[in-house]
Amino acid sequence: MKMTSKILTLALVGLMFMSVNTFAQMKDGGKRGQGIENNIPNLTDQQKTDIEKLRTEHKKQVLPITNDLGLKRAELQNLRTAEKPDQNAIDAKVAEIGALQTKLMTSREKQTQDIRALLTDEQKVYFDTNRKKHNKNATGCAEKKGSGADCVKKCN
């Protein structure tokens, strides 16, 4: 019994070291989800302030939508796994989820255009050409073909 306890302790310590090492090796220094705007060249202090305000407003706007989306997904799961699933109710819930995803995407695109309006032509080129790359690195969404609902969930 003592030997098993020692082995278990060593295994747990080893797992802790591996997880710390993995976190330390993150390419972006653990700054996932902070946005490409942190890397745009030659941003003025005013641009940084304005972008941060836009990001904060966007987060305030999408939080209730994201929360509602989570509830609708849970409701859909309940409908799917019911003893006798009601296809009409499932279809209606899918439509509700689709409407919420549209709201999120519309809000995200508005924020993107609002940020672009603050940038110089040189900064816009950087922003536009690196945006897709940044989203892939931050969320993995660009890698997941055919799993759009999961990507919307992760990207918000």
Image (tube, rainbow, N blue to C red):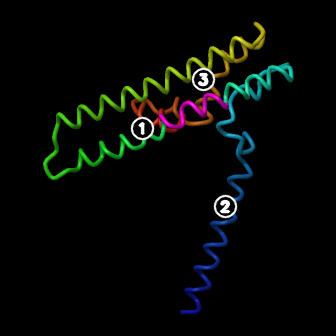
Residue 66, percent from left and from top: 48, 37
Report how far apart the C-alphas of labels 3 and 1 lie in the structure.
24 Å
Q: Is residue 1 left or right of residue 27?
A: left
- Pinpoint residue 52: horizontal percent, then vertical percent: 73, 28
Identify which residue is drawn at 67% across, 29% down. Answer: 55
Q: Identify the magenta region.
A: 56-65
Residue type at the position of mark 3: Lys
Establish if 124 lies above or below 105.
above
Q: Nearer the viewer, residue 84 or 129?
A: 84
Q: Dominant secondary structure of the magenta stretch? A: helix
Q: Secondary structure at mark 1?
A: helix
Give the labeled residue for mark 3. 132
Q: Residue at 64% across / 22% down in the picture? A: 131
Image location (x, y in percent) of residue 43:
83, 20
User: The residue under label 1 is which amino acid type?
Assistant: Leu
Q: Quadrant of residue 150?
A: top left
Q: What label sits on residue 69 in the rendered view?
A: 1
Helix, strand or loop at mark 2: helix
Q: Which label number is shown at residue 14?
A: none
Identify the secondary structure beneath mark 3: helix
N-terminal of the pair, mark 2 or mark 3, is 2
Q: Is residue 63 magenta?
A: yes
Q: Nearer the viewer, mark 3 or mark 1?
A: 1
**Disc 2 + disc 1, Cβ < 8 Å:** no
* Labelled disc at residue 18: 2
Residue at the limit of the structure toward the left, as seen here? 84
Q: How many circles with numbers are drawn on the protein?
A: 3
The quadrant of the rendering that contains the C terminus is: top right
Crowding at mark 3 (Cα within 10 Å: few <14, some 14-19, many 20+): some
Q: Which of the 4 image quarters holds residue 49?
A: top right
